[in-house]
């Protein structure tokens, strides 16, 4: 059974910048995981990818594009050893999109309530997590979400994009 995930991948240059920062902290997931906002967490599926793709294409057609504004940092500690860049704008759009894709063949139970974010440090020592929270406290970027991606985990090669799905009506950054 393949393991899949569905996410909004951060556009450039923001995606590479946050991924590079994550790698500089020694976070081993930085080499496998592109910077993203999760819609469906890693999930083993027992259905053909074509069925998932059909479902995701339908979901994409039902959700208009939206703007995301990433600003500042926060943490899930002490519940989970994660530091992330927070969404100042776009939470509602991400939640609407996550709800649309987490139906049918991707109706999965979440371990925690859905909270869109971009992880920048995970499972590192407290001092490193503290440093990440301070270092990126002034992080600020905006971008339009016009699509999302289906990822498939490929063993030692990590996550690869299987397909991108355009949203119903594109959004424009800054508008």
Image: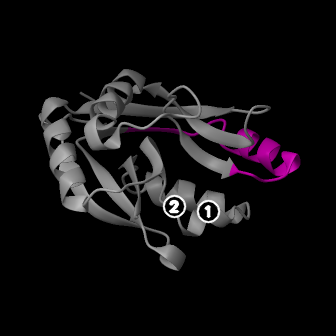
Mark 1–mark 2 CB contact (< 8 Å): yes
Q: How is the image coloured?
A: one colour
- Along the horizontal axis of the image, is 34 left or right of 100? right
The residue sitting at the top extreme is 92
Q: Is residue 52 above or below residue 146?
A: below
Q: Which stretch did the figure color magenta?
A: 122-142
Q: Position of residue 60 (x, y in %)?
A: 18, 39
Q: In what element is the residue under mark 2?
A: loop
- The residue depicted at 87 percent of the width and 48 percent of the height is 127
- The residue depicted at 26 percent of the width and 37 percent of the height is 104
Q: Position of residue 91 (x, y in %)?
A: 42, 25
Which of 98/93 is in front?
98
Disc sitting over residue 29 in the figure: 1
**Could you tell me how far apart the alpha carbons at marks 1 and 2 are, in whole angstroms?**
6 Å
> Would you say residue 102 sits in the magenta stretch?
no
> Would you say residue 133 sits in the magenta stretch?
yes
- Along the horizontal axis of the image, is 31 left or right of 70? right
Q: Position of residue 128 (x, y in %)?
A: 81, 51
Crowding at mark 2 (Cα within 10 Å: few <14, some 14-19, many 20+): some
Name the image quarter holding residue 64.
Answer: top left
Q: Which residue is mark 2?
A: 33
Which of 89/109 is in front?
109
Which of 140/94 is in front?
94
Which quadrant: the C terminus? top left
- The residue depicted at 44 percent of the width and 73 percent of the height is 154
Q: Is residue 28 above or below residue 86?
A: below
Q: In what element is the residue under mark 1?
A: helix
């Amino acid at each position: 059974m393949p393991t899949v995930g569905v996410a909004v991948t951060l556009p450039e240059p923001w995606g590479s910048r946050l991924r590079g920062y994550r790698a500089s902290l020694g976070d081993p997931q930085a080499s496998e995981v592109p910077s993203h906002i999760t819609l469906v967490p890693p999930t083993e599926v027992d259905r053909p990818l074509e069925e998932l793709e059909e479902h995701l294409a339908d979901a994409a057609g039902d959700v208009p594009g939206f703007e995301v504004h990433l600003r500042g940092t926060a943490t899930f500690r002490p519940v989970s050893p994660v530091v992330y860049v927070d969404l100042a704008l776009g939470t509602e759009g991400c939640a609407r999109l996550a709800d649309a894709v987490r139906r049918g063949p991707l109706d999965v139970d979440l371990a925690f309530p859905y909270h869109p974010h971009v992880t920048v440090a995970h499972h590192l020592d407290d001092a490193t997590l503290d440093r990440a929270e301070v270092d990126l406290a002034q992080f600020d970027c905006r971008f339009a979400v016009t699509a999302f991606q289906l990822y498939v985990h490929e063993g030692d090669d990590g996550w690869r994009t299987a397909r991108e799905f355009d949203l119903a009506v594109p959004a424009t950054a800054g508008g």
